[in-house]
Image (cartoon, coloured by chain):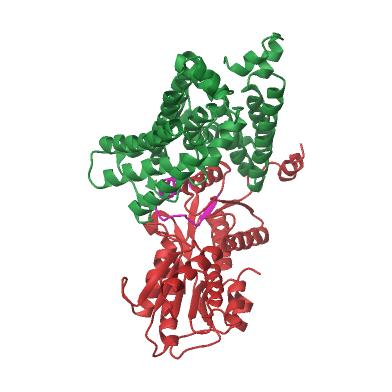
Chain colours: A red, B green
Amino acid sequence: MFFGTAFAVTGHASAEEVIVGLVTKTEVNPFFVKMRQAAEAEAKAKGVKLIARAGKFDGDNEGQVTAIEDLISAGAKGILVTPNNSTGMLGIIKKARDAGVLVIALDTATDPADAVDATFATDNFEAGVQQGAYARKALGDKKPVLAMLDGTPGGTVDTFRHNGYLKGFGLAEGDPAIAGSAITNGAQDKGQVGMENLLSKNSEINAVYTINEPAAAGGYAALKSFGKEADVMLTSIDGGCAGVRDVKAGKIAATVMQFPYKMAAMGVDAVVDYAASGKKPSGFVNTGSFLITDKPVEGIDSKDTEWGLKNCWGD
Amino acid sequence: MNSPSALSFGRTSSIAKKVIGTPSVGPLLVLLVFGVIFSLTNPRFLATQNLSIILQQTVIIGTLAIGQTLIILTAGIDLAVGAICVLGTILAGKLANSGYDPIAAMALAVLACSAAGVAAGSLISGLRLPPFIVTLGILGIITAALRLISAGGAFSVTDEFLGWTGNTIRLNGFIVTYGVIIMLLLYGMVWFLLNQTQWGRHVYAVGNNPEAARLVGIPVGRLLLSVYVLAAFIYGIAAWLALGRIPNADPNALQTANLDSITAVVIGGTSLFGGRGGLIGTLIGALIVGVLRNGLTLAGIDPLWQDLITGILVIVAVALDQLTRGRR
């Protein structure tokens, strides 16, 4: 059979070979694609074998549990996981740890956080605060009329960013300044539809929160079709290179960069370390976030898009 | 197995042809081939622990595929499988978390799932609406209802009874969950219904030719209703099994269960045009998908191969069905 060669190349895993498992949320989200590539590169550099798996869609807990089970069977020394929701993986993570596997949550924390050995992630609440604080300052004296392009309802990261933004902006949930919100699942097409509907509802909107840069790109397309792109301030989170280019082009006023390469590489290193010395990392390790904008405001630390393009993830 | 397709080869009564004509033989061979390949590429594949894991991984889709098989045998299709099952997990979880007796909570959840089957079956048999459209509509309604009920969020289900199906027992060194046993029992019971009762013969007859079935006095409408209700009841049981596997109710879960269950049914040799196939094939079909994913992971091969090979298998299975059908 034609895929026979693929098996032959891989062959038997030798007993001493260190296997690092990576289980991301989905196969298609570019953030996780990049995270996977970074883990692969780091694994290659350290001479260990990476097996990467993913759920099929946001919310595919079963797919992630299955992947972790398979990785335990494969003899993984450590597993890096970005859980689809903060409680869905608890059972299988416990099983893995009981079997002596080091488990590190990347990007998204579990609830309780100490269900895993350690968490390497962006502090998403803090990233939201940075976005909201910038938006409030940049709006100046204008009375805010805010639209929110949210991710997936109930998602851990989504909730942190949303709440962080409101805190940074100085608004309470339900404040009349919030003109409305839309669910985008972090996707550009849904971001566009959501923004179109919100603009139809309220033409006074002058600030837009977005869960990530694809949703922001969709939001911008809608603003443009309404002829509002110059009057409305769009901000975002992610730090993907396409997003930073959108900041440079003036489509997005500011974005908050996170560092998936760092999460993945640190995760692989931690497993390699554990295999060699038995030493486990612990607690929440903030991999950092940084505001990127070419229109800085007073009192808020930021870097320009030149720095952003050097440090962004993706292509 | 005494399926109608085996009988269609009746005139050329050599045993060999009968065996080839039995729809579950092809899938069984495929399963064995994959088993051999994977045991050669990684010795861990055949470890009893790994084999029992594969069985556990098959529980949800394998159980949902029982209902899907019944419906496809009547030449129908169910696109609301996953949504109905998630409805069961959310309702049982919500009720139990808010202090209901967990057994009552689970029973109410299974009842609610069955009610969805009553709705689907009534519309299909009463108004003669196409199953594709009816179940597509129900998928939309339930998905929206789930997000409204749970405000979009996932939550933990900690009740012991609801998670009971995930407990393990040891059978000759083989560790299985109660979920696996319940799934296999369900296969046995529904197999009996399909192959040893008049009801089962009627299911095949309606799937083969509903008009002819009507003419010989089979109450087609009532039969279709019973099939959709039984299927939805089984999805409700699957919800219990799902909570045993992952004690977490998530309105976004099981989005691919519709296509996954149809895949298991089709790879298992049941005809999408109705009237041919059976449950043993479906169980093997579900196992093939599980074995593929597990084996490729153990070998460290990109999971995209799984989708590619599964896609080929689906087309081959339908092509075989079409070819053997042409020979009748």
Q: Where residue B298 appears, x then y in whole percent?
A: 61, 42
Looking at the rendered image, the quarter that the N terminus of chain A falls into is top right
Q: Which residues are magenta?
A: A77-100
State how many labels appear.
0
In the rendered image, the vertical position of residue A86 relative to residue B172, given as above or below:
below
Place residue A44 in its image quadrant. Answer: bottom right
Nearer to me, B65 or B244: B65
Q: Does the magenta portion include A291?
A: no
Nearer to me, A164 or B232: B232
Whether residue B167 is visible, yes or no, is: no
Looking at the rendered image, the quarter that the C terminus of chain A falls into is bottom right
* Residue B166 left/right relative to A310: left
Q: Where residue B71 appears, x then y in whole percent?
A: 50, 30
Q: Does the magenta portion include A97?
A: yes
Q: Residue at x 66, y 10 (%)?
A: B10
Nearer to me, B289 or B199: B199
Q: Residue at x 64, y 48 (%)?
A: A17
* Residue A17 left/right relative to B127: right
Q: Where residue B38 appears, x then y in whole percent?
A: 66, 35
Whether residue B202 is visible, yes or no, is: yes
In the rendered image, the vertical position of residue A60 relative to residue A292, given as above or below:
above
In the rendered image, the vertical position of residue A137 relative to residue A202, given as above or below:
below
Q: Where residue A133 appears, x then y in whole percent?
A: 41, 81
